[in-house]
Image (cartoon, rainbow, N blue to C red):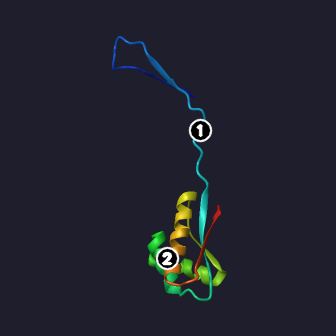
Amino acid sequence: MSSEKTNTEHPDSSVQTIVEPKEKTKIPSMYKVILVNDDYTPMDFVVNILIKFFRKTEPEATNIMLQVHQQGKGVAGIYPYELAETKVFQVQNYARLREYPLKCTMEKE
């Protein structure tokens, strides 16, 4: 598909610009950010992380935390690659600074 534009700034000009897209914009791949259960990180700390970094409400955060606790892991959110990578880094850094071994990973959806 092409579109045609006529230069309207100079009425006497017969300059035309034809723009043809070379390829369609690709929708970025999405990645799940996953919290992994461990025996040391407190449940309320996990809830706090979900609220702070993933903008979850307290009931949403509690449900995800229970999934992590009972099933071994839970999805905190789904994001484009760069944002998912940033979230993983932020969570791991925040947990390490508080001396918790909480593991956060990402995988392609």
Q: Is residue 56 visible?
A: no
Residue type pointed to by label 1:
Lys
For image coordinates 50% across by 70% down, the residue present is: 90
In the figure, is residue 106 to the left or right of 97? right
In the figure, is residue 60 to the left or right of 107? left
The image position of residue 54, as x and y in percent, is 48, 70
Residue at the far top: name it.
12
Residue at mark 2: 94
The residues bearing labels 1 and 2 have C-alpha atoms spaced at a distance of: 39 Å
Q: Is residue 4 above or below residue 38?
A: above
SS state under label 1: loop
The image position of residue 103, as x and y in percent, is 60, 77
N-term mark: 1 or 2: 1
For image coordinates 49% across by 75% down, the residue present is: 50
The quadrant of the picture occupied by the C terminus is bottom right
Q: In front of the other: label 1 or label 2? A: 2
The image position of residue 102, as x and y in percent, is 58, 80
Residue type pointed to by label 2:
Tyr
For image coordinates 49% across by 80% down, the residue present is: 97
- Label 2: few (<14), some or many (≥20) within 10 Å? some
Q: Is residue 35 visible?
A: yes
Corner quadrant of residue 72: bottom right
Specify the label residue 24 is tagged with: 1
The quadrant of the picture occupied by the N terminus is top right
The number of discs equals 2
Q: Nearer the viewer, residue 40 or 55?
A: 40
